[in-house]
Image (tube, grey):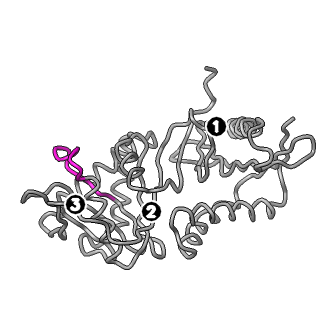
Amino acid sequence: MTEFGVLDDHTGWRKDFERRLRASYAAAGFGVPAAERMLEGVRESIGDWTVAEITDTGTRVGHVAVVVSDDNGLVAGRIGDLHVDAPHAGRGHEQAARDWAEEWCAERGAGRIGIRLTEPAGGLFDDYGVRGQLRARRVGSPPEPVDGVTARPMTQAEYPEWLAAEKASYAGDIIRAGALNREEAVLKSDRDFALLLPEGLATPDNTFLVLEAAGGPIGTGWLRHGHLPGVTYGYSLHVQERHRGKGYGRAAMSAGELATLAAGDSTLMFTVWGGNEVAMNLYTSAGYRVVEEMRSLALPRSAA
C-alpha cells in the first residue's frame, strides 16, 4: 500500500534531487558551470516546497514535492518533484503520488497544477497539457551550410518592424499554450522585451540575423550569448510563412549554431511553446534534447 509522510528534514531528498538534475543537464550538453547556474534557479524556490516520503509497507520507495502559490492572480499548484526509485518503479506508486499531489494542491485552493518534467515519466502526465519545452544541444563543430541560404546582421532600419512582429508572436505563443489570456500576454510581452533589449539592436551579447535566399529575406534570428556559461539562448529563429516547407528551418538553426560557436559558446538552447508541433519536430530531427518540459492540468480533475 502506498503511503505518504511529510518530511521535516529535506536534506536527503534534496541531495538526490540535485544529483538527478545535474545528470539531466549534463546529458543535454551543459557543462558544470551552466548546470550549476540552472540549479541556482531551482534552489531559489525549493525552500517553499512540501516534501513527502513515499512508502510501501514501511519501505521508502521515493519522494514527491509540492507547492501552492499565486500565479497572475490564480492559485496554482506545482509538483516540484515526483520520483520513485528504480527497484520500485511501475508498481502504481507513481500514479498514487500524482493523485496525492493533485489532492494536496486542490485542498489548498489551486485551480490548476503544473509540473516541470526533467526525466521520462511514461504516460503518467499524458493528460496534462504541454505548455512548453526547453531544448538544447551541444554544438561540436560548425554545421554544414544550406545551399543558397545566407545570414547577415540585421540593420537598424529593419529592427522596429522585427521587434513588433516578435512581441506579437511571443504573446501569441503564450496565449496558444494556455498560460495567460490575451491582455496578460501582451503586457508580459512588452515587459519582457523591455528587460531583454534595453538598448535595442545595440544590446550587448545579442546577435540579430536576417536570413536570405534567392536574393531576398526569408527569415530572422535572435540569439543571446552567455545566457549561461558556454550556452547561447535562441530567443527566435523564424522563417516567413510563405517560405516554409523548403528546408529553411534547418538553415535557420545552422545559422544559429554558427553564431553560437562564433561567440565562443558550445551549447545552443531554445524554448518552444506548447502547440507548436512543427518546431518540436524540427528540434527533435536536429538532435535537440528536451531538458525540461512544462505541463499543466485544471483542478479539480475531470471525472472522465
Circle 3: residue type: Val
Residue corresponding to mark 1: 124
Total numbered badges shown on the rendered structure: 3
* Secondary element at tag 1: loop
Q: Residue at x 26, y 69 (%)?
A: 200
Residue corresponding to mark 3: 146
Residue corresponding to mark 2: 137
Placement of the N terminus among the 4 image quadrants: top right
Quadrant assignment, res 33: bottom right
Circle 3 packing at 10 Å, graded few (<14), some (14-19), many (20+), is some
Task: Look at the image and tell me whether residue 181 can be seen.
Answer: no
Q: CA distance from mark 1 to mark 2?
A: 26 Å
Give, as a single range, the part of the protein colored magenta: 236-248
Q: Residue furthest top?
A: 304
Looking at the rendered image, the disc whose residue lies closer to the viewer, 2 or 3, is 3
Q: In the rendered view, tell whether residue 237 sits above or below residue 264.
A: above
Q: Residue at x 49, y 41 (%)?
A: 130
Q: Is residue 62 left or right of residue 1?
A: left
Q: Is residue 275 left or right of residue 290?
A: left
Q: Is residue 162 left or right of residue 169?
A: left
Q: Position of residue 222 (x, y in %)?
A: 29, 64
